[in-house]
Amino acid sequence: MKTNDIKKGMNIKTGQLGTPVSGVMLDNLRGNTRLVDVKGSEVGMFDEMGSVYAHDILMVEVDGVWEDVEYTEAQLKLKKQVSAMGF
C-alpha cells in the first residue's frame, strides 16, 4: 500500500523512534508528513501525537494483515536528504 492511501484510523508501524512501534493514522492527507498517534510506551518512551515523515511509516494493517508500505519518489528523495543530514 502507498503511504498516500493510508486513511485515518488505520493501524500502522513507524520507525522514527529507532525501534518500530505501533501507531494510529490521524489524517487523510497526502505528502511527506502525516499526523500519527504513536505508541512510544511500547519501547519505554511516551505516547504522543504529531507529524511523522511518510518514509518512517513501515507497515499498515489492512483487513487484519500487515502490509509493507510503498513510498513516492518525493518521499524517497526527502528520506535521502534527511539521512544525509545525519537524522
Image: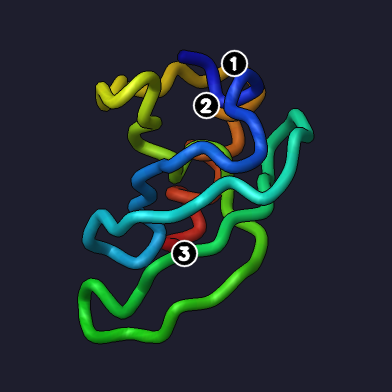
Mark 3 or 2 closer to N-term? 3
Judge whether 61 appears above or below 23 on screen. Answer: above
In terms of secondary structure, where does tag 3 sit?
Answer: strand
- Residue with the mark numbered 3: 38
Residue in front for this viewpoint, 76 or 53: 53
Residue placed furthest toward the front:
63
Residue placed furthest toward the right:
29
Judge whether 69 appears above or below 51 on screen. Answer: above
Judge whether 8 appears above or below 50 on screen. Answer: above
Find residue 24 and report its horizontal and vertical position in percent: 51, 51
- Residue with the mark numbered 1: 73
Q: Nearer the viewer, mark 1 or mark 3?
A: 3
Q: CA distance from mark 2 to mark 1?
A: 5 Å
Find residue 72 and report its horizontal and vertical position in percent: 59, 17
Q: Is residue 65 left or right of residue 63?
A: left
What residue lies at 31% left-to-right and 79% top-to-bottom?
A: 41
What residue lies at 47% left-to-right and 64% top-to-bottom?
A: 38
Local crowd at mark 3 within 10 Å, few (<14), some, or many (≥20)?
many
Q: Are marks 1 and 3 in contact (CB under 8 Å)?
A: no
Colour style of the rendered protein structure: rainbow
Local crowd at mark 1 within 10 Å, few (<14), some, or many (≥20)?
few
Q: Amino acid at mark 1?
A: Glu
Mark 1 or 3 closer to N-term? 3
Tag of residue 76: 2
What residue lies at 75% left-to-right and 29% top-to-bottom?
A: 30
Find residue 22 and report its horizontal and vertical position in percent: 34, 55
Q: Amino acid at mark 2?
A: Leu
Quarter holding the C terminus is: bottom left
Q: CA distance from mark 3 to mark 2?
A: 22 Å
Q: Are marks 2 and 1 in contact (CB under 8 Å)?
A: yes
In terms of secondary structure, where does tag 1 sit?
Answer: helix
